[in-house]
Amino acid sequence: MGTEDIIRTQVAAFNRHDAVAFAACYAANAVVADPQSPDPLKGTEAITKDIDDWFGAFPDIETRMTRTVLNGAAYAVEWSMTGTHEGPLVTPDGHIPATGKPVRINVATIGRTDAAGRIVEERRYYDLSSVMSQLGLIQ
């Protein structure tokens, strides 16, 4: 499976809210840097829990790719996500109770895949303060 295929598989799994299939797009030893996590996520178990937490907080969340740049095993993707905060949002500082508010999150990911086509390294970029503002938690 090539890099573009794994990204499309990842999007489909995300939109089905299938955390296990989403994490299966990553190599067992993958490392993911995410703005919400003080330490990188390491391995598919941590990645599964992270995405499953998002599905719990935003049960109607969906995403679409808005731009993709591929260069062999390296990629950069822009995503647009929308959802409603209807469950507890897990953060390093505790759980944020549901607000019932909608959010739109623009995300960029930069990463690379291995010879088997699995993601081995990824950096996620999104504006956490914008998310918190949309939830009414900060001004």
Image (spheres, rainbow, N blue to C red):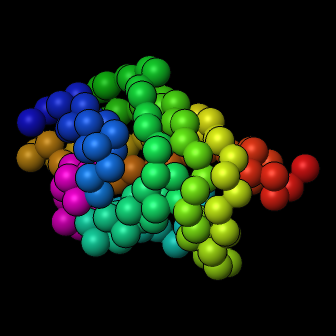
Q: Position of residue 20 (x, y in %)?
A: 22, 59
In this view of the protein, which residue sits in the foreground, 32 or 107? Answer: 107
Quadrant hosting residue 9: top left
In this view of the protein, which residue sits in the foreground, 23 or 56? Answer: 56
User: Exactly how many numbered labels are in the figure?
Assistant: 0
In this view of the protein, which residue sits in the foreground, 49 or 5? Answer: 49
Q: Is residue 25 above or below residue 42?
A: above
Magenta highlight on residue 65: no
- Residue depicted at 14% across the width and 43% down the height: 117
Q: Residue placed farthest to the bottom in the image?
A: 94
In this view of the protein, which residue sits in the foreground, 101 or 79? Answer: 101
The stretch in magenta equals: 20-30
- Residue depicted at 52% across the width and 36% down the height: 81
- Residue depicted at 29% across the width and 57% down the height: 19
Q: Is residue 83 above or below residue 92?
A: above
Magenta highlight on residue 24: yes
Q: Residue placed farthest to the right in the image?
A: 139
Quadrant hosting residue 90: bottom right
